[in-house]
Image (cartoon, rainbow, N blue to C red):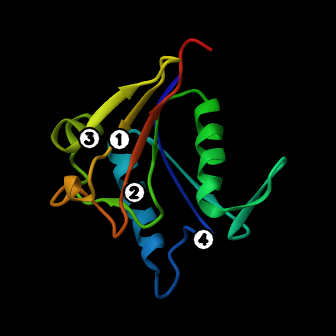
Amino acid sequence: ARDVLLLMMDTRPARLASPPEHPQLAFELNRRYACAHGYDLLYLRMLNATCVHEEYGERHASYCKLAAVAEALSRGYSWVIWLDSDAFFRNVSMPLPLLLSQYGDRTTTGANGSNVTVVGAPGAWRGADVRSPACRPLLLQPCRRW
């Protein structure tokens, strides 16, 4: 099983354009962070601002991240870290375990044995090493009992 996947998604390309937009810069910073620590980085580019659920039809982009996370978890990663497309790791030298021990709020174990690490109030990450206007990283670990 692979260990850690950083997951991002946006309608804009990840490549640096001229001039680059914020999500493209965030992707590049996260790419460097992933390389420095041996993590994988997956950037999914949405073709539209919405996605389609087979039962409920067209859905807002925020629902699309659930499908992206499910896909990433199905690839066998021990941890999937969802990052909004404008969030990035400011301190490339700080690995995730240290980052979580300093700034993580809590880890909850679900009834099925899955773990979800949740960041608390928006101020919980103030001064931390992840920055974004709407940064709420979500760390997920797949259930081992399925």
Q: Secondary structure at mark 1?
A: strand
Q: Looking at the rendered structure, which numbered label has been put on residue 95?
A: 3
Neighbor class of circle 1 (other Cα within 10 Å; few <14, some 14-19, many 20+) is some
Q: Looking at numbered disc 2 in the image, what kind of residue is underneath it? A: Asn
Question: Residue 69: x and y, percent?
Answer: 58, 42
Residue placed at 58% from the left, 27% from the top?
Answer: 76
User: Where is residue 29 shown, x and y percent of the image?
Assistant: 36, 62
Compute the Cα span from label 3 to label 4.
Answer: 26 Å
Would you place residue 88 above or below residue 102 in this image?
below
Name the outermost residue toward the bottom: 19
Identify the residue at horizontal 46%, vertical 88% (top origin). Answer: 19
Where's residue 7, x and y in %?
51, 49
Q: Amino acid at mark 4?
A: Pro
Q: Which residue is mark 1?
A: 118
Considering only vertical position in the picture, is 101 above or below 67?
A: above
Give the amino acid at mark 3: Pro
Residue topped by disc 2: 30
Gap between marks 1 and 2, in whole Å? 20 Å
